[in-house]
Image (cartoon, grey):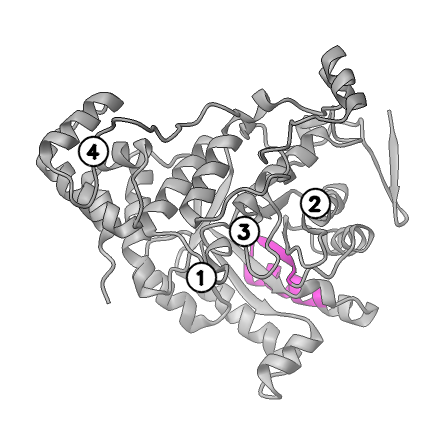
Amino acid sequence: MGETKNNGFRYDVGEPRKNRIYIMDVTNRDGVQTARISLSKLQKTMLNIYLNQMGIHQSEMGFPALDHEKNYIEANLRLQEKGLLQPLVLSGWCRAKKEDVELALEKTRLKHLNLSISVSQIMTQGKFSGRMDRSDVIKMMVEAVKTAKDKGVEIVGVNAEDASRTDERYDEDYLIEFALAAKEAGADRIRYCDTLGYDRTISIYDSVHRLAKAVQLPIELHCHNDLGYAVANSVEGAMGAIDAGVDAYINTTVNGMGERAGNADLVSVILALTKSRGLRHGSSILDPKVDLKMAWKICNYVANAFGQPIPINQVGVGGNAFAHESGIHADGMLKDRNNYELYGPEELGIGEVEVRRIGRVITTGEYGGLKGLLHVLEELGIESVDARKTLHLVQYAWHHNQMELTADEIWLIANYPEEVRQILTVTP
């Protein structure tokens, strides 16, 4: 049994644990806020489908208070009711304001919400310009939480934006006061946000451990990558929560997409939780539903949808992740791959994804016809009850995405036409 020390706390890495770490992916909320790029509503839906297939616990799917998200959210809830998006938890994000909560619940049927408000002194002063002090922040948050609970929201998470910059002791006491007030109002989780990627592994473990001990609610870790610590901070922050006796939820994005330098990368976090020193043989700490073999498929889909190629050195799925050239490395690999690999490409499903064909090919798209669609459906083994309706939706979906449709997107259109029609309806 090994023992690891971290800033005065310790955890027995070989011990079985009653608490778990769950993955809550926020690509469809935080990832799409990345400057200059985004996803269509159909692509966001496909990502939810892939996250569900991957065994991810929750998708923060968007902004329920925004008009243009309404149809997409409702259609995804309908797909969930039909069994396609189960057991994935679908949740939304809004500001911790009573009015925003009421608007979100007026527009959508979401039963899981995260309510966000700033907690650091610098943001309280910088954002509210003297109109509100830190006691006002707590009052606003409490009112929003109570409103959500009164209206039937099942899981309310409270986001402490910029929590990592409550790093002076009196400030951290305020963070605990804030979290305790949220708990008393009915909140189910507290999100510790390292909004500017300011934390280090030691400091985030310490702060989250103290917060979780005091509040005894599950803690979400939301880490940005401004200093390159996002994955490490997510894992160590989660360990702080686990060691304090509560569950942890790590917020991730596919390929680490997110504002500025991005967020904690989904695949990197999963690999860190299952392959790193001290956790390599302790897979029981991670939600057992997670299926890493979906990694290659989901990362490539999101890369293509965003129009952002996967970096050659990306953890797990980059073009060079399993490439070996150095003489010593190549010799060691040929003798035993464990000499230079912690995990193999087959564990990430590499190679098990569609490849765009070249040469003589018939495609279907914005200007395609019925005969061409029937040929494509036959090749893909997809049955359509109403081929003309499928063609109509394929044409609109191509226009919606502004790129060639994947086989899975065509399958979704053929099998769930009414939900796809709703997703494609984005009205002002």
Local SS, label 1: helix
Q: Are marks 3 and 1 in contact (CB under 8 Å)?
A: no
Q: Is mark 4 on a helix, strand or loop?
A: helix
- The front one of 35 and 236 is 35
Q: Quadrant of residue 356?
A: top left
Residue where numbered disc 3 is placed: 257
The quarter of the picture where the C terminus appears is bottom left
Q: In this view, does 54 lie to the left or right of 18?
A: left
The answer to whether the residues at label 3 and label 4 have Cβ atoms under 8 Å apart is no
Residue 353 located left or right of residue 229: left
In the picture of the structure, the residue carrying the numbered disc 1 is: 148
Q: How far apart are marks 4 and 2 (CA)?
A: 41 Å
Mark found first going from the N terminus, 4 or 2: 2
Give the mark nearest the N terminus, 1 or 2: 1
Q: Which residue is drawn at 19% across and 45% down?
A: 366
Dot 3 and dot 2 residues touching (CB under 8 Å): no
Nearest to the eye among marks 4 and 1: give it.
4
Residue drawn where x is 22% and y is 25% of the image: 382
Question: Could you say which is closer to the camera, residue 43 or residue 357?
Answer: 357
Horizontal and vertical percent position of residue 319 = 58, 33
Say which element carries label 3.
loop
Marked residue nearer the N-terminal end (3 or 1): 1
Q: What stretch is highlighted in magenta?
A: 175-195
- Per the model, the C-alpha gap separating discs 3 and 2 is 20 Å
